[in-house]
Image (cartoon, rainbow, N blue to C red):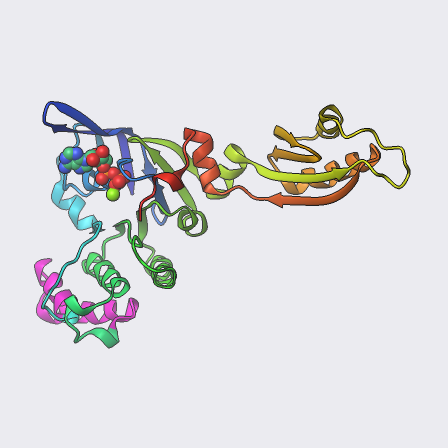
Amino acid sequence: MIETTGLTKSFNRGKSTVEAVRGIDLSVAEGELVALLGPNGAGKSTTLRMLTTLLPPTSGSARIAGHSIETDRDAVRRSLGYVGQGNGGGHNQRVRDELITQGLCYGMPKQQAASRADELLSALDLTDLEKRTVGTLSGGQRRRLDIAIGLVHRPPLLFLDEPSTGMDPQSRANLWDHILRLRKEMGTTIVLTTHYLDEADSMAERVVVIDKGTIIADDTADALKAELAGDLVTLSLSASSSSGAAEALTAEALAAVVQGVDGVRDITTSGHRLNIRVARGDRALPELLRRSESRGFSIEAADLSRPTLDDVFLGLTGRSLRENATV
Ligand SMILES: Nc1ncnc2c1ncn2[C@@H]1O[C@H](COP(=O)(O)OP(=O)(O)O)[C@@H](O)[C@H]1O
Ligand SMILES: [Mg+2]
């Protein structure tokens, strides 16, 4: 559905040049749901605007549903729906009329445009609002209308730029229900951008992490976390074993507990606490507990925490995505 090679975009700003996108190679298959995750300024919107033919690339190429974004712009545009970042503003048209107008723009006869509008109103739970004017909708309702508008011409591919930014958690969850349903019912391929880590984590099967105009990771959220961050196991040990045969709780003794355990990446100790980064915490924990006990340490507390995508981003860039994110 999408195939890009070395896509780049530079903007001239006065005397300086901003390299917004620096060589993106991305391939998205039919039916995928892909989240482009990255901090503000990473180049997400610029990438979408090139893929939707709104912006010519500086170099590189891309095909959408087999059509070149440079030489076949009309075919590309017919293949996709695009909901840009922060559409909106007041609007006096009624919700249903707005959708019908869009259909007419795509050359549908009036009757067909009206039935398509009704279909989409129902698919996005907007039927009750059909007579409201667009300007009176809440943020979440407006976003659902934007998505409906993007789908009027039944595109196989839908781009959503920061669809949930600025929404309260409940509206975000509701929007996601709709996005997931669309995908299931219409088989639409969906590429969306977000800087919400939790959202990319829980909703998309595939997360493409973008930083400074390049893709720095591309996989399922689970795989990214397992490969790049690892689980964190924290053990609090005490030297007072019931058998009385405990070693002193030196850093060396603690390190010896961990030595040889599979998949360990990093160990830090603080007092009687051991923090262990390990590929699979669920597998390592029982062995760590056994080893601690066999050395005569008793276990006061054991904790296993899964990494977040922020740990992944931190591991890749040395920066936290949270610090960069402005909502
Ligand atoms: N029209 C433009 N003119 C100049 N610079 C731009 C323009 N659009 C985007 N940029 C710059 O390109 C970089 C990437 O922007 P953008 O693609 O909007 O990032 P994101 O969507 O990931 O937040 C930023 O540094 C931004 O300031
Ligand atoms: Mg953007």
**Residue 236 placement (x, y as % from top left):** 71, 40
Q: Main secondary structure of the magenta part?
A: helix
On whether residue 98 falls in the magenta region, the answer is: yes
Quadrant of the image where one finds ligand 1: top left
Where, quadrant-wise, is the N terminus in this rendering?
top left
**Residue 270 placement (x, y as % from top left):** 65, 32
Q: Which residues are magenta?
A: 97-126
Relative horizontal placement of residue 80, taking residue 71 as reference (left or right): right
Q: Residue at x 16, y 58 (%)?
A: 88
Q: Residue furthest front?
A: 271
Q: Is residue 54 above or below residue 186?
A: above
**Number of disc labels:** 0
Q: Is residue 114 above or below residue 180?
A: below
**Residue 42 placement (x, y as % from top left):** 29, 35
Relative horizontal placement of residue 86, taking residue 108 as reference (left or right): right
In the figure, residue 279 lies in which quadrant? top right
Which of the two residues, 151 or 237, is positioned nearer the viewer here? 237
Q: Mark yes or no: residue 260 visible.
A: no
